[in-house]
Amino acid sequence: MTCSRCRTKPVIKLPNSNISLCKTCFLKYFERKVRKTIRQYKLFKKGQHIGIAVSGGKDSITTLYVLNKITKPQRTTKLTAIAIDEGIKGYRDETLKFAKKVCKELKIPLETTSYKKEFGKTLDQILKKNDIKPCTVCGVFRRYLLNKLAQKLKLDIIATGHNLDDEAQSILMNQFKNNITASARLGPITGIKSDKKFIRRIKPLYFLTEKEIMTYAYLKNLATKYDECPYAKDSYRDEMRTLINNFDRKYPSSKHSIINSFIEILPLLKKNHKKTDINYCKSCGEPTSQEECKTCKLIREIK
């Protein structure tokens, strides 16, 4: 087997397009795909201040690295890495060390906040005293703190490391739960453009698979041994990941088919789904569709 483009030794085979690529050709392919996604979906403009949500895992660090490479020649586009320390002992402290190291090497400022600072408790402490699913807490608290930190830093947009695998999982999870409203909020760019307090999110790695990102991170020395949250095991998403991976192994390109068909119907979903009016939480003032936001409700419920 040789590289489909230059006939040298390949480092990866891409079943979706039935090609194999060497290191040089793969890195070009990867970065071109990110550029195409940014251009096609108009993820950001020159001169904007982009926040990159980093956890220290391969997806977020790869997003940081590639966006830095793409925007560096522009000079007018500013990047700031933002991180949330949930307080997962032996995991998040280690991944954040790596995030700090990469940010220092790339000369990108890193701003952090934590559950402990904002809510008075770490995730470990919350789970020790409450019978609650870890992903439920994190899903609510992380989104809240990222948006709050983004406002404080006056960011125009937040880039996340969500990839093709993540999106395929979210699409099917929403289908299984009959949650069309949540599906309408998916896509390469999300959020409400007209609301200044809700900072929009972009997904530059949207059309790249977990395998492709893993390969890129390895080739660029961006991978770490700490990538999977210890609390993610046996979660609903974890089960969906296993289901889709098994199906994709048996029927290659299934993940891509899920994404491609979803992208086709997404404009209709956004047009037809019932739009919720944005209110502001009576307790904290942050954007919410309810009288009180999920974060404030959750804070009151936990011990």
Image: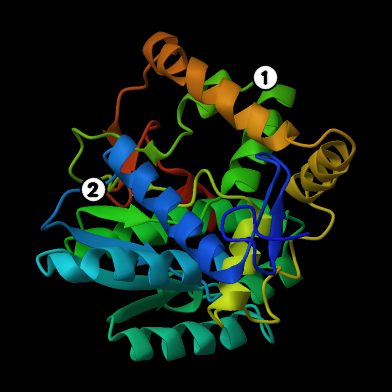
Neighbour tally class for label 2: few under 14, some 14-19, many 20 plus, Cα within 10 Å: some
Q: Is any part of residue 41 visible from this angle?
A: no
Q: Amino acid at mark 2?
A: Phe
Q: Is any part of residue 160 visible from this angle?
A: yes
Q: How is the image coloured?
A: rainbow
Cα–Cα span, label 2 and label 1: 31 Å
Q: Earlier in the sequence, mark 2 or mark 1?
A: 2
Q: Which mark is residue 178?
A: 1
Q: Is residue 50 left or right of residue 212?
A: left
Q: Residue at x 86, y 43 (%)?
A: 249
Asked if residue 11 is positioned above or below residue 261 in the image, the reply reads below
For label 1, the SS is loop
Q: Return the residue at label 2.
A: 44
Asked if residue 159 is positioned above or below residue 278 in the image, the reply reads below
Q: Which mark is residue 133?
A: none
Q: Residue at x 64, y 50 (%)?
A: 136
Q: Residue at x 54, y 26 (%)?
A: 183
* Total numbered labels: 2
For label 2, the SS is loop
Asked if residue 203 is positioned above or below residue 154 in the image, the reply reads above
